Image: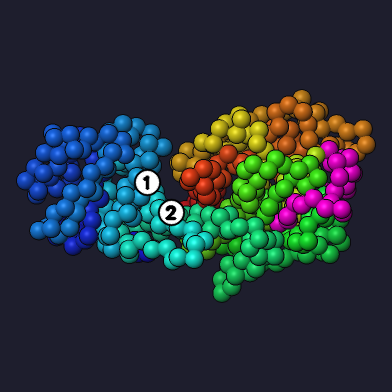
């Protein structure tokens, strides 16, 4: 897929489709295009065929012009970043449904920030092209090969090009995460994820991968993580991917992504209905793969370590039982009251392991609690942190990228619910499950700045649109991009 920026005469650029985002009142370039079409767009508005309302659309053909068709997308009411993104995503989705190979995107209608708008466009085009093919019948790929982002001034093309490169990389990163998460659990096992990590690093000078096997983890004392994989025939892995885009002396950002490749709940067995979606319990880990992929494409000047604890949680005669006590890598003991609260058991050892990289910041990403859906629904991720500045940076990155989060409190009053009579802590509390889960993790993150993203509500869609979303790759990349001074 090729993206490029141009300030050439838009009426002479030969393409299959011209995408114009406009409201019911035509201004600037929209007026110029309408004049060249003898008022055709204005006629569509007057007739009611195109309202100009947010994300409304209309396609009409212009066979005697440089562009064979015009795709109109409404932007009236696009008063927020989220609404602007909605309009752009609608345009990208519609474009990919046409038989267009070459397209021209008019980029002066939504935002004065050319780089931002170009990045969201490229990201949206890439994600709208994603298709999972699990059928024996081949899926027809999109015919789209190139999109030219048109700028009013030639001086704007440099910013647009920068945005196109970044947005395309983020879109590809999201698709990488989606592609892994959508795989069935009999294919996407902990060993499969390890092989994909090695594949991602192959031929990449800035990326190295190492895999810790169960024997290695046992030597390190990761009794908490290993207690989750104990009941499965699939061995667990701790996958470490390092991207070095800055000097070796620069402290890295460490991303820790939960990857339970299938979660039955263990002995605390889940209900059967909807259990098929528990293949998505590795979406946190998948997002780390997506970020590393995006970093390779953007070549950001930053160091990032991705840690992915990958296990399968199954019931068996040797599986961990409710009431068992396990010892974490930190030396702290944990009473496992519910084996379905397993994500925190693998994350706590990975978070302890993260300290050896002397991190600038640590962010963990996990489909951790159903409680976050009850609190926030499926629109936004839950964010908890021991550092206000880090929390604000992630929230701002979420707003700018349209991949939002909402901060929840991390108070000691909640932490008290983890009290155990038989260990240093229990693995579940009582009320406010999302918060008590983060309180549990916070006991292993006292030596560095840390944030926790609970993406159980945002990582995948259910129903007829069932599939992974690729979130929170956009938020994480925006955070890293800002931190790198890009």
Residue 381 occupies which quadrant of the picture?
top right
Q: CA distance from mark 1 to mark 2?
A: 9 Å
Residue located at (37% from left, 46% from top): 89
Instruction: Pick whichever, 61 or 32, lies toward us.
Output: 61
How many residues crowd mark 2 within 10 Å: few (<14), some (14–19), many (20+)?
A: many
Q: Position of residue 462 (x, y in %)?
A: 54, 43
Residue at (66, 29) in percent of width and height: 409
| 260 vs 216, nearest the viewer | 260
Quick check: is 320 in the magenta stretch? yes
- 148 to the left or right of 300: left
25 sits to left or right of 462: left
Q: Earlier in the sequence, mark 1 or mark 2?
A: 1
**Mark 1–mark 2 contact, CB under 8 Å?**
yes
Residue designated by label 1? 89
Q: Nearer the viewer, residue 381 or 111?
A: 381
**Residue 179, relative to residue 361: is it above or below?**
below
Residue at which label 2 appears: 127
Residue found at x 80% / y 50%:
315
Instruction: Give the image quarter of residue 104.
Output: bottom left
Q: Residue at x 67, y 38 (%)?
A: 369
Instruction: From the viewer's side, name the closer residue of 356 and 279.
Output: 279
Residue 401 image position (x, y, % from top left):
46, 44
Q: In the image, residue 175 lies at what x, y percent?
A: 49, 56
Magenta span: 309-337
């Amino acid at each position: 897929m090729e993206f490029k920026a141009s300030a050439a005469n838009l009426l002479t650029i030969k393409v299959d489709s011209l995408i114009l985002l406009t409201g019911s009142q035509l201004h600037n370039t929209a007026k110029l295009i309408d004049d060249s079409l003898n008022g055709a767009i204005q006629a569509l508005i007057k007739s009611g065929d195109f309202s100009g309302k947010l994300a409304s659309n209309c396609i009409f053909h212009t066979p005697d012009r440089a562009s064979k068709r015009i795709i109109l997308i409404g932007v009236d009411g696009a008063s927020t970043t989220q609404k602007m993104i909605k309009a752009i995503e609608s345009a990208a989705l519609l474009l990919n449904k046409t038989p267009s190979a070459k397209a021209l995107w008019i980029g002066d209608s939504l935002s004065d920030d050319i780089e931002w708008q170009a990045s969201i466009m490229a990201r949206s085009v890439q994600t709208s092209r994603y298709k999972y093919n699990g059928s024996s019948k081949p899926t027809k790929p999109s015919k789209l090969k190139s999109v030219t982002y048109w700028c009013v001034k030639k001086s704007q093309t440099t910013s647009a090009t920068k945005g196109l490169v970044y947005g395309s990389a983020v879109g590809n990163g999201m698709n990488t995460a989606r592609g892994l998460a959508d795989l069935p659990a009999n294919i996407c096992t902990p060993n499969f994820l390890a092989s994909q990590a090695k594949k991602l690093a192959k031929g990449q000078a800035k990326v190295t991968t190492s895999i810790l096997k169960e024997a290695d983890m046992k030597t390190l004392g990761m009794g908490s993580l290993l207690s989750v994989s104990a009941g499965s025939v699939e061995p667990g892995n701790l996958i470490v991917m390092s991207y070095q885009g800055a000097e070796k002396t620069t402290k890295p950002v460490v991303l820790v992504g939960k990857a339970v490749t299938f979660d039955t709940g263990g002995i605390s067995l889940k209900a059967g209905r909807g259990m098929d979606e528990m293949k998505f319990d590795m979406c946190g880990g998948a997002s780390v793969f997506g970020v590393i992929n995006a970093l390779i494409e953007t070549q950001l000047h930053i160091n990032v370590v991705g840690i992915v604890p990958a296990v399968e949680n199954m019931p068996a005669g040797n599986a961990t039982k409710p009431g068992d006590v396990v010892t974490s890598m930190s030396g702290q003991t944990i009473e496992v009251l519910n084996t379905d609260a397993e994500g925190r058991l693998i994350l706590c050892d990975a978070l302890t392991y993260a300290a050896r990289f002397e991190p600038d910041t640590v962010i963990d990403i996990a489909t951790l609690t159903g409680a976050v859906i009850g609190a926030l629904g499926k629109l936004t991720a839950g964010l908890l942190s021991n550092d206000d500045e880090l929390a604000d940076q992630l929230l701002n990155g979420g707003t700018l990228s349209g991949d939002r989060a909402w901060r929840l409190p991390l108070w000691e009053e909640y932490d008290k619910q983890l009290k155990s009579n038989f260990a240093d802590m229990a693995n579940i509390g009582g009320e406010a499950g999302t918060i008590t889960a983060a309180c549990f993790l916070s006991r292993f993150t006292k030596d560095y700045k840390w944030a926790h993203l609970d993406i159980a509500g945002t990582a995948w869609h259910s129903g007829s649109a069932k599939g992974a979303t690729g979130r929170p790759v956009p938020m994480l990349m925006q955070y890293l991009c800002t931190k790198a001074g890009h």
